[in-house]
Amino acid sequence: MQVFNVHEAKTHLSRLLELIERGEEVLIARSGQPVARLTAYRPTRRSIAPPGSMKGRDWQMDDDFDAPIDALFSCLQEPEGEPGAPEVGR
């Protein structure tokens, strides 16, 4: 692992990136004290579960899963007998 001070790292950033791309690690120090370690970026691999992978697992869907949810929108309707906002553009 090569050590560079902050000034060298700023001045030779392209060269440091080349070292990192070759698999080396770079340590940046300020006044001789390590501040940061630069390594190559490796994106995390997200795996997608294949269809059927939940087979045999203990989970159940409620019986009313696909029941209508009319009550959800009742709060948006005007109560009977009360005037609402005037209709615009009709």
Image (cartoon, rainbow, N blue to C red):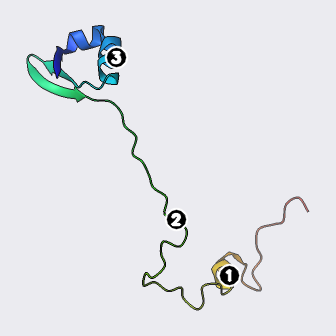
Characterize the local packing of mark 1: few (<14), some (14-19) or many (20 or more) Cα atoms within 10 angstroms. few
Q: Quadrant of the C terminus?
A: bottom right
Characterize the local packing of mark 2: few (<14), some (14-19) or many (20 or more) Cα atoms within 10 angstroms. few
Q: Amino acid at mark 2?
A: Pro
Q: Amino acid at mark 1?
A: Ser
Left or right of 47: which side holds 77?
Answer: right
**Numbered tag placed on residue 74 in the rendering:** 1
Callout in the foreground (3, 1): 3
Q: CA distance from mark 3 to mark 1?
A: 63 Å
- SS at badge 3: helix
Q: Quadrant of the N terminus?
A: top left
Q: Residue at x 88, y 58 (%)?
A: 89
Name the N-terminal-most of marks 2 and 3.
Answer: 3
Q: Residue at x 28, y 12 (%)?
A: 10
Q: Amino acid at mark 3?
A: Glu
Name the N-terminal-most of marks 2 and 1.
Answer: 2
- SS at badge 2: loop
Q: Residue at x 85, y 60 (%)?
A: 88
Left or right of 66: which side holds 83?
Answer: right
Left or right of 44: which side holds 23?
Answer: left
**Numbered tag placed on residue 50 in the rendering:** 2
Residue at image mark 3: 18
Characterize the local packing of mark 3: few (<14), some (14-19) or many (20 or more) Cα atoms within 10 angstroms. few
Q: CA distance from mark 2 to mark 3?
A: 38 Å
Which residue, as the protein is rendered here, is positioned at the far left?
32
